[in-house]
Image (cartoon, rainbow, N blue to C red):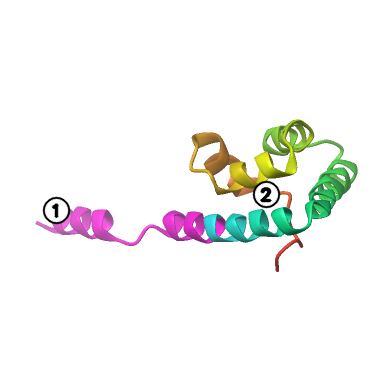
């Protein structure tokens, strides 16, 4: 009976990851709005990636992907990407280089 009770508690416990994902989606919607108003804020993300690459001697795979995304997409496409629910956007949202853009 205890095992069954513990499993029920585990299955019904709040998922902290879903809260973090929700906060990240909200943040990215705000960043997308800022990009639409002032595309130069993208330079902050590029500068963050350069700083992190210098500090850590390279970029982790997610930051490498961000570097490519920032080079390939126009500001409008980037804003749309940040607001999208695609698996790639959701995954990269966890490693955003837009630190300091909307704090």
Q: Is residue 103 above or below residue 72?
A: below
* Mark 2 Cα-neighbour bin, 10 Å: few <14, some 14–19, many ≥20: some
Residue 4 marker: 1
**Residue nearer the viewer, 48 or 10:** 48
Element at label 1: helix
Percent x, y for residue 42?
79, 49
- Foreground tag (2 vs 1): 2
The N terminus: image quadrant: bottom left
- At a point 50% along the width and 36% down the height, the residue shown is 87
Q: Residue at x 54, y 60 (%)?
A: 26
Residue 37: name its quadrant: bottom right
Residue bounds of the magenta highlight: 1-24
The secondary structure that dominates the magenta segment is helix
Q: Kindly identify which residue carries mark 2.
A: 96
Quarter of the image that includes the C terminus = bottom right
Upstream in sequence: badge 2 or badge 1:
1
């Amino acid at each position: 009976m205890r095992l069954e009770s513990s499993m029920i508690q585990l299955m019904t416990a709040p998922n902290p990851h879903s809260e973090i994902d929700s906060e990240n989606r909200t943040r990215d919607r705000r960043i997308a709005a800022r990009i639409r108003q002032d595309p130069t804020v993208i330079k902050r993300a590029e500068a963050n990636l350069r700083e992190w690459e210098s500090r850590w001697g390279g970029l982790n795979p997610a930051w490498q992907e961000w570097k490519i995304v920032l080079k390939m997409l126009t500001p409008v496409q980037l804003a749309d990407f940040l607001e999208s629910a695609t698996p790639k956007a959701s995954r990269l949202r966890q490693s955003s280089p837009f630190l300091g853009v909307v704090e």
